[in-house]
Amino acid sequence: MAGNAPPARTPESPPVHIPSLGYRILVAGLRIIPAFLVLIAIPAAALTFVNSHGVSLPISVYSVTVFGIALLAIGAAQYVLKPTVAYGPLTVAYSSVVIVYLYYASTLSPYHLSVPGGTASIAAGFALFLYLLMVVPAFGVIAGVLTTVEDVRDPRERLPFDFPG
């Protein structure tokens, strides 16, 4: 009887529906618009407005713009390349840029705000808060490393979860 046993059944892989490259590029481009507003336009406008009223803030418009462009570029590439093995390393890169950005901002602490034309000043230390915020992108780095390892081991394993058919 043991010789007549049917062969072991392998489960069929679930269906996968990966959007076309053109569609992913279009959606990544559309996602850049609100991200540009949140990461670059609004902070740069706020910094310019505050600076024009005689209050100097420790972070420059240039820094906000450079980090914002880096995050926009990596985020768009991450979305477009999600079905490939490049997704994990891009996740690590994105989270690493966020950590560097937060660390850079933490080096500007404490900030002493002096009222223009007055003698009053306020000091605000925010480094500890930014260090605590770095925990979130640190988990992103870990997730990106684990995704990279899984994609190297089996490149199509996560696709049914990311792109269910």
Image (tube, helix red, strand yellow):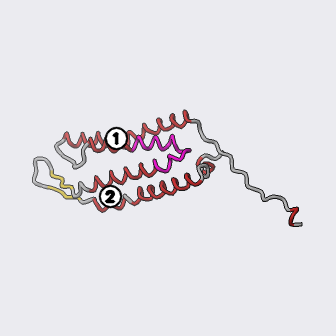
The numbered dot on residue 40 is 1
Left/right placement of residue 23 relative to residue 70 reads right
| Kind of residue indicated by mark 1 | Ile
List x then y, in percent, for residue 1: 89, 66
Left/right placement of residue 38 relative to residue 83 reads left
Q: Splitting the image into 4 quarters, where does residue 139 fall? A: bottom left
Q: Is residue 67 above or below residue 139?
A: above
Of 153 and 143, which appears nearest the observer? 153
Q: Residue at x 18, y 53 (%)?
A: 113
SS of the residue under disc 2: helix
Residue holding disc 2: 130
Of 62 and 153, which appears nearest the observer? 153
Q: Is residue 137 above or below residue 35?
A: below
SS of the residue under disc 1: helix
The numbered dot on residue 68 is none
Q: Residue at x 33, y 52 (%)?
A: 100
List x then y, in percent, for residue 70: 37, 43
- Tell me if residue 76 is in the magenta stretch: yes
Left/right placement of residue 48 relative to residue 120 reads right
Cα separation, mark 2 vs mark 1, equals 19 Å
Left/right placement of residue 100 relative to residue 2 reads left
Q: Residue at x 22, y 49 (%)?
A: 58
Q: Residue at x 18, y 41 (%)?
A: 53
Q: Residue furthest front?
A: 3
From which residue to which does the magenta span run? 71-90
- Tell me if residue 46 is in the magenta stretch: no
Q: Residue furthest right?
A: 1
Main secondary structure found in the magenta portion: helix
Q: Earlier in the sequence, mark 2 or mark 1?
A: 1
Of 115 and 127, which appears nearest the observer? 127
List x then y, in percent, for residue 121: 15, 55
| Kind of residue indicated by mark 2 | Leu
